[in-house]
Amino acid sequence: MKIAVAKGDGIGPEIMDAVLKIFDANGVGLQYDFVEMGKWVFDKGYSNGMTPQAQQTIEELGILFKGPMETPKGKGVKSVNVTARKTWNTYANKRVFQTLHGVDTVFSKAGIKIDVTIVRENIEDTYGGIEHMLTHDVALSRRFITRPGSAQVIRYAFEMARQKGARRITCGHKANIMKLTDGLFLEVFYEIAKEYPELNADDKIVDDLAMQLVIRPDVFDVVVLTNLQGDIVSDLCAGLVGGLGFAPSANIGDHISIFEAVHGTAPDIAGKNIANPTALLLSGLGMLRHLGFTENAAVIENALLYTLEQGTRTGDFGDRSKPALNTTEFAEAIIANFGKQPEVGAKATSENTPYTSAVCHLDKNPMLVSKEQEEEKIVGVDLFVESSEQPNAVAERALRQTGDLFKLVTISNRGTQVWPKGSVFTNLVNQYRCRFETTNDMAVTQTDIIELYRRVATEFKVCSTEVLNMWGDKRSYSLAQGQ
Ligand code: NAD
């Protein structure tokens, strides 16, 4: 079996060499096709950080094992790590955080065992990077949460929880504030939960979740979150089990999956052969299990756990009174311990099982659309306009342009209503949202909206527009704070 391997930048080549050496010493039946990705590929003039040959190889092989990669700063290019995850629709980012015997943390010292799997949505959310400056003072980031995108990652989380024999699956969210975006994610979570009655499905508001994870990490099992919240919560979990050096990650898609460590290129220690390869090794073990090399994975993991239990360490962790090994020596210590069983947390060895490749040749982009359920009608528009005037003055000018079809119902500033009611204590910025709704709730057309836009644009610079729809009797937009 062949996989694509990109060694990465900084410490990437050092830790990748160490991990592949361990795999080879264990007789893992994998061949490697080394592909060109990373900072040096940007520097060669490839604006997405990978060569076309690399892209073709990865799409043909379906598995990418990668070291960390650096995004050149100040060149306006996007992170190759994020590009890879998004281009190949690796919608689920799975990160397993377990207590490792020999890696002391406040929890391990208190005898609290941690085994939490975070599943983070990997494509949508603010990671779309769709941002605009609307005025010189106001920046906007568009945060897309979609029903099919949420369903992909949430279904993966439930399937994985079932296979893991988990008891509990928790959805982390901020649906109390972001009622439509996080609300949609939460709605999809509970819809899918109905298909998995054996799992105890619950939800936690993300700030509470962060606190609970620190106080009682042992009561959590599988946690699924949107992208940005998942990013933060998973680093928090890395801290619970000993830091980034022990945090593996898998980016799972239907056709292509990417396995990498959570940490970055560690430029401060690059080239010194002192980096800790454990996180990349754990990511590689996840990949071996994904590919059916379960026996190899168990033997290597047991050797790793045994090595850690012995107090063997690289410079970034462990008992400082003991000498630290360099990256190569640490890998050799693990190899020397093949066949040994750790005192705690030994993995059962089951035979390797053949992997059925998920790679298929697509000739067009898959379109993910769920069934529309309600009749849709346009009932208004939010026009975001630039102005440094007081709310009453903005209202007066906007009211001049409403025409017969529309009425001005509210004006808000940074989401807080400032007209027709408001408080003089609300600080203002130079951008207002004017919400126009149709008179008598009648439906209008896009052309009517454009005509209103044209009229309002005679008074203000219109920075952004969102159409207000009703789906049946359900509003497809949120109300302003105080509306
Ligand atoms: P980093 O994770 O590279 O380093 C943070 C700290 O942790 C440093 O002190 C570093 O020495 C230490 N560290 C990280 N990995 C280690 C290891 N295996 N062994 C020992 N110590 C380790 O984070 P950063 O400095 O914020 O980012 C550096 C670069 O990495 C940036 O260009 C960033 O964009 C990139 N990055 C890439 C990925 C990825 O490829 N998936 C992820 C995160 C950051």
Image (cartoon, helix red, strand yellow):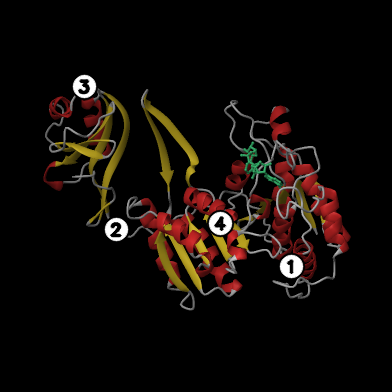
Q: Is residue 144 left or right of residue 254?
A: left
In this figure, which residue is indicated by the disc labeled 1?
A: 292
Task: Determine whether the residue tagged by mark 2 lies in a helix, strand or loop.
Answer: loop
In the picture, the disc for residue 459 is 3
Q: For the residue marked with disc 2, what is the amino acid?
A: Glu
Q: Is residue 123 left or right of residue 96?
A: left
> x%, y% of residue 332?
86, 56
Task: Determine whether the residue tagged by mark 4 lies in a helix, strand or loop.
Answer: helix
In the picture, the disc for residue 374 is 2
In front of the other: label 2 or label 4?
Answer: 4
At label 3, counting other C-alpha atoms closer than 10 Å, the crowd grade (few under 14, some 14-19, many 20 or more) is some
Q: Is mark 4 within 8 Å of ligand 1?
A: no
Task: Determine whether the residue tagged by mark 3 lies in a helix, strand or loop.
Answer: loop
In the picture, the disc for residue 364 is none
Residue at image coords 13%, 29%: 399
In the picture, the disc for residue 237 is 4
> x%, y% of residue 69?
68, 40
